[in-house]
Amino acid sequence: MNGNIALTLPARDFALDWRRFNLVANYIAEYASYNYAHKDRAENVISSVFYELLEHMASISREDALLALRLAADNGHILFEIASSGVEPPSLKRHEQLVGELRRGDLDSWYRGILETEPEAAPAGGLLGLALIAHDYHADISTQSGDSGAVILRAALGQEEMNP
Amino acid sequence: MTVSGEKYLISFDALDQQVNFEGYVRTASREDLTSIMDYLVDVHGKQNGSMSLNFRKLRYMNSSGVKVIADFLRYARQAKKLTIKLVGSKVIPWEEKSLAPLRGLWDGIEFQIYDERFYESQGIIEDAAFIPLLRNQTRLLWPREKPVLVEHGLREGMRAADICCGCGDVALLVARELGVGSIVGVDHSMPAIDYANRLQREFKVNNAEFRLGDATALLLDDEIFDFVLCRLSIQIFSRPDEILRELHRILRPGGRLYLTGEDYDLIVGYPNEAEIRSVYDKAGRYGQRMGMDLYNGRKLYASLAGMKMKNIKVDTIDADNLGTHRPTFAEMIASWRSFSAETIGQELGITESERAELLAGYDAHLATIRHPHGYTKWSVVAASGEKSK
């Protein structure tokens, strides 16, 4: 399908300057948006979701890791994927726990609990971001990890999320 | 009283007790987030009654920013001093998705989509069914309006914007036939923007771009356009000043703002002179009941002068049944007939006899167009002014 995009970038670049989250999320969103009937809405949704995924994956990746970003449309869904070539075991454990939380229980109450948390105790940006896209964009988030610290994060959004 | 970052500006409008967010709040910096929270708390402390947070010009906010807003709402809940209104825009999806759930934090929070119903006739004007009427109007007007645009200063290579561009056909003609460097078309109707994008692909016009947007809160930078058009649109808004302020803001000093408006008193014809006058008087009054001003053409000079524009020019663009393709003229009047008597009539709940009178009046106008010796004219007022340097 037209508008699919894949990019590979070093995690270090994001550690050096976090403004690259915005730059890359907007680039991917604008590139892909021409593929959607409601271009402006698609661009805003894709950028918002990609930004949070990217911030999260960069925050758990080693600086020498590579981040492979992919956006594809498939069967009424938009698939966001970020594969990191290197996540340390403690970060991986936290990441898997979080994705596990997203996939079970009452998402509304859990998200409300995060919003009610005092700022000092609130989860770091990336964790909060995954919760936000699961709750507000109804993203189906899953993860897969390999033996050598490689981790793939996927989020699938229904095309209807682009509609008013 | 403002707080800003590299890509955002947060300011306070005392008149509306409203904090306005502009740009992108996508920051991971604890310092930035703390200064936003401190600013909101500071403003909160100085108000009574209610306070609004206006996000209509904020293109993006990341989850850390959303959390700061949630923290502020929790603060306001605890303080029990003010109610808080969150104001978002229909054209920026993150706002409805991420701000609406914040209502759950406290019943003192209201969430409003500002442009959900921000002009009376929005539902009908922004419907796909309105597009054929726009296309017919362009067919009639464009050959006459093209030289007027040049006369009013539109030149090759200019950076232009067509705000409230409808289905985009005029913006594409400006791009293709007048050789502007680029043109950005903005409209609040999703079917119209979708149509414009399709038309652009079909015509392979590369120097045009269409965006969904709210003309009262444009996501366009200050002073970037050489020529800004807003055609036959201000008349439908009950708050035209909000649009004019934005048109002025995006125009560079020395650039020109070009407006066109209707004046139903200028629609004339013979034979059936009395019936034609009567039907447009009625249509004008029904339009007024829908919040439209179908006589705004005569007010455009005053609007431009009120904005302290210089070198103001005013012209009329006249389309008559002799100089235009007669069936197209008739088709346009038939579209007006249907729009006025059926669509607007239904919205206003007019009686069967009122509807019959309208239909008969438009039928008389159609008869004039088709009459071998009939003459009729539709005039649109075009006015432009130069932004002071």
Image (spheres, grey):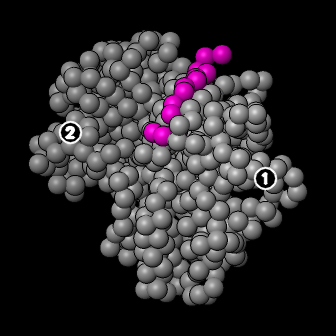
Residue B349 in view? no
Residue at the (24%, 45%) spot, across then down: B223
Residue labelled with disc 2: B256
- Residue B319 picture location, percent across and down: 34, 23
Residue B365 painted magenta? no
Q: Which mark is residue A97?
A: 1
- Residue A107 picture location, percent across and down: 81, 57
Quick check: B319 above or below B289?
above
Along the line of sight, the residue nearer the viewer: B11 or B302: B11
Tag 1: amino acid: Gln
| Span colored in magenta | A1-13
- Residue at mark 2: chain: B
Quick check: B2 above or below A70?
below
Residue at the (47%, 46%) spot, across then down: A15
How far apart are the two marked residues, 1 and 2, measured between alpha carbons?
58 Å
Residue at the (45%, 12%) spot, across then down: B203
Quadrant occupied by the N terminus of chain B: bottom left
Residue B49 in view? yes
